[in-house]
Image (tube, coloured by chain):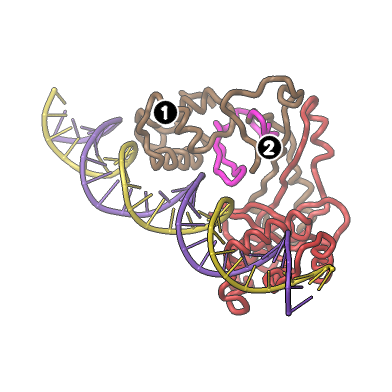
Chain colours: A brown, B red, C yellow, D purple
Amino acid sequence: MTFEEAIRRLREQGLKRTPSRESILRLFASDGRYLSASDVREALAYEHPAMSLDTIYRNLSSFAGLDILEETELGGERKFRMHCDRDGHHHHFICMACGRTEELDLCPMDQVSALLPGSVIEDHKFEVYGRCPACSTGADAELPGSTQEKA
Amino acid sequence: MTFEEAIRRLREQGLKRTPSRESILRLFASDGRYLSASDVREALAYEHPAMSLDTIYRNLSSFAGLDILEETELGGERKFRMHCDRDGHHHHFICMACGRTEELDLCPMDQVSALLPGSVIEDHKFEVYGRCPACSTGADAELPGSTQEKA
DNA sequence: TTTTCAATTCGGAATCATTACGATTTAACT
DNA sequence: AGTTAAATCGTAATGATTCCGAATTGAAAA
């Protein structure tokens, strides 16, 4: 999703366009990785040295509620990324070294419901972790400032 | 896994058999659900009113390392359950109302590696959440003291 | 443009889960 | 029984997240 589309979605919902929100959305529009609240804080340290963590958390949560951001939980932290553009439901491969993600056009849920007669399925989580091609060859680069190894 | 098998595994590893460990393992042997550290604390409040949280966390972590317990992260908490007996790799359906789990004899990973040429896959997570048959019909029981709804 | 007001932000305190640590106790071996 | 490393306790520290009252501000109305 683009920055402009996210701003438009804010308007539609009657939410205000503030400098904080613009900066946060611009950041996610330019960085496809999953970022935590403190990642956001660091990335915006120059533009907004005094942005409150409350502001960051509050906005990340509301953006996720508006489907502007996607949310997951990784290594005990809530992490967010810009909502993917692709149409269908899908999942992600996440590089634990650099944080890059790859969309997986695959969902196992169609096979699951048959295994759970009588149950109501409300949600599911499927994520694959590893090292992307660039990070799996020891020598190659890892994006700066992006160590995302699991605890 | 039974209590006896877990104790045997402790011996094999040269770990001591202590009253704390016995109580924790007995609890997991009798309750198939995913339990957090504070769930354990509450459940053992009568037997061990003064068991330190440090003791609980330390033991849960080491039991998970010995494959006595399985670990997951749910609603921002680390949760543990007795390791399943079944042979093969598998995943779980978790009832968000009562915490009961159902094993899913299915893993999507065989289809995934082909989609990620050049990447090294190190781990994955697949979980299905919902309401089990007993909890999906509004009237029916939910196990006492076991509200596990996501935040 | 000024006024207005609810939405937003700030800063710091509070909360919750988890980990760390020094002092004490204890299981298991001799 | 004595020895010793492992385990436990109690508490303090940490880190992520949420809460809250006071101050600010975006955007619609006057």
Quadrant of the image containing the N terminus of chain A: top right
Q: Position of residue B60 (x, y in %)?
A: 68, 60
Image vertical order of residue A54 relative to residue B9, above or below: above
Q: Which residues are magenta?
A: A70-98
Camera-side residue: A24 or B134?
A: A24
Q: What residue is shown with label 1?
A: A45
Q: Residue furthest top?
A: A140
Q: Position of residue A123 (x, y in %)?
A: 64, 50
Is residue A93 shown left or right of residue A143?
right
Image vertical order of residue A36 relative to residue C2, above or below: below
Q: Chain of mark 1?
A: A
Quadrant assignment, res A120 = bottom right
The structure residue drawn at horizontal position 58% and vertical position 27%, both measured from the top left corner, is A32
Q: Nearer the viewer, mark 2 or mark 1?
A: 1
Q: Identify the element where label 2 is drawn.
A: strand
Image vertical order of residue B62 relative to residue A59, above or below: below
Quadrant assignment, res B62 = bottom right
Residue A91's tag is: 2
The amino acid pointed to by label 1 is: Ala
Camera-side residue: A68 or B4?
A: B4
Camera-side residue: B86 or A113?
A: B86
Q: Position of residue C11 (x, y in %)?
A: 31, 41
Q: Identify the element where label 1 is drawn.
A: loop
The amino acid pointed to by label 2 is: His
Q: Position of residue D30 (x, y in %)?
A: 13, 35
Is residue B43 located in the magenta-colored stretch of the structure? no
Residue B66's tag is: none
